Amino acid sequence: MDRLKAALEDFGRMLLFAVEMVAWVFRPPFRPELVLAQMAFIGVGSAFIVGVTGTFSGMVFALQMNFAMKQFAAEGYVGGSVAFSLARELSPVFTALMVTGRAGSAIATELGTMRVTEQIDAMESMAVNPIQYLVVPRVIASLLMFPMLTMLFNALGYAGGFVMGVYVARIPIGPYLAHTQEFMKVSDILHGLLKAVVFGLIVSVITTWRGYAATGGARGVGEGTTRGVVSSSIFILLADYAITFVSVGT
C-alpha cells in the first residue's frame, strides 16, 4: 500500500510538472537557439540508429510476410503489408523506443546530474526558471523530431522491404508497387505521425521529470535514468494500444 501511495504521489507530481512546463511554453523569453540545439541532439543524433533499425525491420518483415503469403499464392501483397504495418505501427513505436534508449536516457542523466550538483538550484538563484530553460526546449524538440524520425523509419523500412521482396524473394515489381498503392492511404501515415507526436510528448516529459527530480547523488541519477527509460517504454506501449483501440473503433 505504501509503494502504491508513493507511486501515485510521484505520478501526480509529474503531472503538475507537465502542466507547469506547458505554461512556460507560451511565456517569454523564448529561446529558439536552445530548441535548435536539442533538435540536433534528439533528431540528427538519433537518425543513424533509427535508420538502421528501420532498414532491417523492413527487410525482416518483408521476408516474414513473403513466407506467410506464399501459403496463399499472394506474394504480391507483401509490399502493401510492409508499408501499411510500418506506417501505422512499427515506425512510430520502434522509433520512440530507439530514441528513448539513446536521447531519453541522456536527457534524464544530464538533468539529474545538474540537479544533484546544485546547478539547477544555482539557476533559480539567478532568476532563471529551470523548467523554461532546460525542459521546454527538450519537449518542443521532441514533438518536432519524433514525426521526422518516424518518416525516416518509414522510408528506409519500405526501401529495405522492397529490396528483400523484389530482389531476394523475386516478387515482380509491378504487383509489389500496385498493392502498396492499394493498401496505403494518407490517413495511415497521419495515424503513425499522431502516435509519434504523442510518444514524443511522453518520452520528453517523463525523462526530463526523472532527471529534474533526481536525488541521492550518482546513484540517484542512475536510478532516475533507469526509471525514466523503463517508464517511457511502458507508457509508449500503453499509448500505442489506446490510440489503436480508439482508431479502429472497437
Image (cartoon, grey):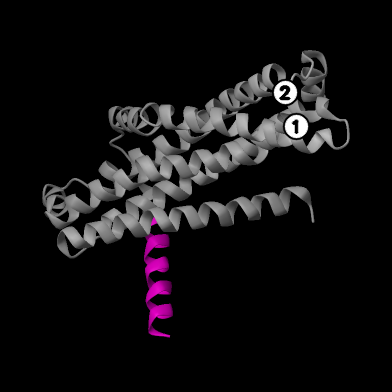
Q: Which three-letter amino acid code belongs to the residue tagged 1? A: Asn
Mark 1, other Cα within 10 Å: few <14 / some 14–19 / many ≥20 = many
Q: Which three-letter amino acid code belongs to the residue tagged 2? A: Ala
**x then y, percent, for residue 24:** 35, 46
Above or below 199: residue 147: above
Q: Left or right: 198 with respect to 205?
A: right
Question: What residue appears at the point 64 percent right and 25 percent down from the top-left corner?
Answer: 158
Q: What span is in magenta?
A: 1-18
Q: Which residue is mark 1?
A: 66
Q: Nearer the viewer, residue 131 or 191?
A: 191
**x then y, percent, for residue 135:** 32, 45
First in sequence, mark 1 or 2: give its number.
1
Quadrant in the picture for residue 12: bottom left
Task: Find the residue positioned furthest to the right.
Answer: 72
Quadrant in the picture for residue 187: top right
Q: How many marks?
A: 2
Q: Which label sits on residue 169?
A: 2
What predominant SS class does the magenta segment belong to? helix
Task: Find the residue positioned furthest to the bottom.
Answer: 1
Name the element at disc 1. Answer: helix
**x then y, percent, for residue 83:** 70, 29
